[in-house]
């Protein structure tokens, strides 16, 4: 996280809250619960355990939501050291009004009303007390939404914090957070492996302008989307979000490619993730459209332009050390086509294990993909036909 650690600020808040939360020894149970929760929060802050502090402040607010100290503690923890996990049961017991922030729950998989896979948004009503500056351009961002996901219905883990510059983009911030949750579930479901960043929370910066050109980029645990007011098709937004996420989630491959980027994991990941969604991963198209609130209808064009040529590049050569060793745009396309072909013929778990194999060698050299790819392909069922178009693509072709 990019927050600057300010222990003296938190200590001051803790001391202030301690004074505000004192109650008499014969206070009623509610006041005792409040006092106990506040004391627990202060002890957690002293130990720099901000998730425990946040959950204790939630308990205090549940006991007595009229106490400003508990609400102040929640807000200061959110804004200065965002908790990595929160207790859902306590969150659900908070009052539905009168708080300086909104809490909303959204099923990650469309149509699954009782699904444990949920996205939770905590969105302060007001701007941040102090503008947050991004770590690359040092641009000011006045608002934030905190995006949590849960897979068990008990604890929710921080997926990302989304910063935006004006209230015009609050809806976009929520939509991007929702889609990132679906994409993250897709990665977990299909790769059967941990993310390259070990599921660390990351930051998303929604920028009104761009330093050079529009699009996006990734730096450390930050992903940027530039010129967000410019027109983009829905499928281009989905591709771009999946691309930047993939720089965090997928193991690095390359580093010496000359075009279109030095590392290939962004392009490889976007093609795998978007195709997996089309094929039903994490609830498939209904989940994408429920989260993104826009159409996924541009996928056939995505497949025609980005999937089919890559697989054709691979199948025209077969498994080749020479092609895998190329570092130009054709070499990247060949490598991506090989991994898409392996996904089709060997399964998505094979993709995860092959990428992990070069990470285990502390390398990102695409040449090291050759041997694990050869072994995986040698074990592939002989009757599998790779790259079967999705059913809705067949219908489009038939109509024409």
Image (cartoon, helix red, strand yellow):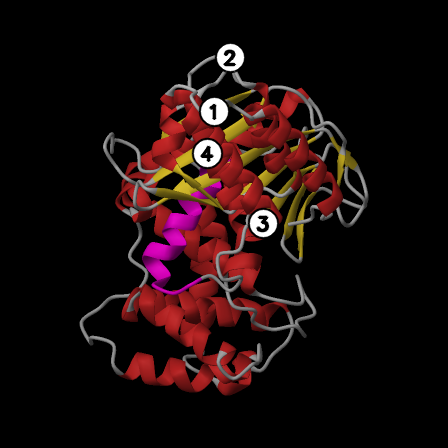
Question: Which secondary structure lies at badge 4?
Answer: helix
Q: Residues within 10 Å of mark 3 (few under 14, many from 20)?
A: some
Residue assigned mark 1: 61
Between disc 4 and disc 2, the foreground one is 4
Can residue 290 be seen from the camera position used here?
no
Marks 1 and 3 close (CB-CB < 8 Å): no
Q: Is residue 101 above or below residue 356?
A: above
**Which of marks 3 and 1 precedes in the sequence?**
1
Question: Which secondary structure lies at badge 3?
Answer: strand
Residue 126 rendering spot, x and y as whole percentages = 65, 20
- Magenta stretch, main secondary structure, is helix
Q: Is residue 181 magenta?
A: yes
Residue assigned mark 3: 202
User: Label 2, label 1: how many angstroms apart (C-alpha)?
Assistant: 11 Å
User: Label 4, label 3: how many angstroms apart (C-alpha)?
Assistant: 32 Å
User: Label 4, label 2: how many angstroms apart (C-alpha)?
Assistant: 23 Å
**Which of marks 2 and 4 precedes in the sequence?**
4
Query: Residue visible at 56% across and 26% down?
Result: 21
User: Label 1, label 4: how many angstroms apart (C-alpha)?
Assistant: 12 Å
Q: Is residue 221 left or right of residue 272?
A: right
Q: Residues within 10 Å of mark 1 (few under 14, many from 20)?
A: many
Between disc 1 and disc 4, the foreground one is 4
Q: What is the number of the mark on residue 121?
A: none
**Which of marks 1 and 2 precedes in the sequence?**
1
Residue assigned mark 4: 36
**Which of marks 4 and 1 precedes in the sequence?**
4
Residue range in magenta is 177-194
Between disc 4 and disc 3, the foreground one is 4
Q: Residues within 10 Å of mark 2 (few under 14, many from 20)?
A: few
Query: Residue visible at 72% across and 36% down?
Result: 12
């Amino acid at each position: 996280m990019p927050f600057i650690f300010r222990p003296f600020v938190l200590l001051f808040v803790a001391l202030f809250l301690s004074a505000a939360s004192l109650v008499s020894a014969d206070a009623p149970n509610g006041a005792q619960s409040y006092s106990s929760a506040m004391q627990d929060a202060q002890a957690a802050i002293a130990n720099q355990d901000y998730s425990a502090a946040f959950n204790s402040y939630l308990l205090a607010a549940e006991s007595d939501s009229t106490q400003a100290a508990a609400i102040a503690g929640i807000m200061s923890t959110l804004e200065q050291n965002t908790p990595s996990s929160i207790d859902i049961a306590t969150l659900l017991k908070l009052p539905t009004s009168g708080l300086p922030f909104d809490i909303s729950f959204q099923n990650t998989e469309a149509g699954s009303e009782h699904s444990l896979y949920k996205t939770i948004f905590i969105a302060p009503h007001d701007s941040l007390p102090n503008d947050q500056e991004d770590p690359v351009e040092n641009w000011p961002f006045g608002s934030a939404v905190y995006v949590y996901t849960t897979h068990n219905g008990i604890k929710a883990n921080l997926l990302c914090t989304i910063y935006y510059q004006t209230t015009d983009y609050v809806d976009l911030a929520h939509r991007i957070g929702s889609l990132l949750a679906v994409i993250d579930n897709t990665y977990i479901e299909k790769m059967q492996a941990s993310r390259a960043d070990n599921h660390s929370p990351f930051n998303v910066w929604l920028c009104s302008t761009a330093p050079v050109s529009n699009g996006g980029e990734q730096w450390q645990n930050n992903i940027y989307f530039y010129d967000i007011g410019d027109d983009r098709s829905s499928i281009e937004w989905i591709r771009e979000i999946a691309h930047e996420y993939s720089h965090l989630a997928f193991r690095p491959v390359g580093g010496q490619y000359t075009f279109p980027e030095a590392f290939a994991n962004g392009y490889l990941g976007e093609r795998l993730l978007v195709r997996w969604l089309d094929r039903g991963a994490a609830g498939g198209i209904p989940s994408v459209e429920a989260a993104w609130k826009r159409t996924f209808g541009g996928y056939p064009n995505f497949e025609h332009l980005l999937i089919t040529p890559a697989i054709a590049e691979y199948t025209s050569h077969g498994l080749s050390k020479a092609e895998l060793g190329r570092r130009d745009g054709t070499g990247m396309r060949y490598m991506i086509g090989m991994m898409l072909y392996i996904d089709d013929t060997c399964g998505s778990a094979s993709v995860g294990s092959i990428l992990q194999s070069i990470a285990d060698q502390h390398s990102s050299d695409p040449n090291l993909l050759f041997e694990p790819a050869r072994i995986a392909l040698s074990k592939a069922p002989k009757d599998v036909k790779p790259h079967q178009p999705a059913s809705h693509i067949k219908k489009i072709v038939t109509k024409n």
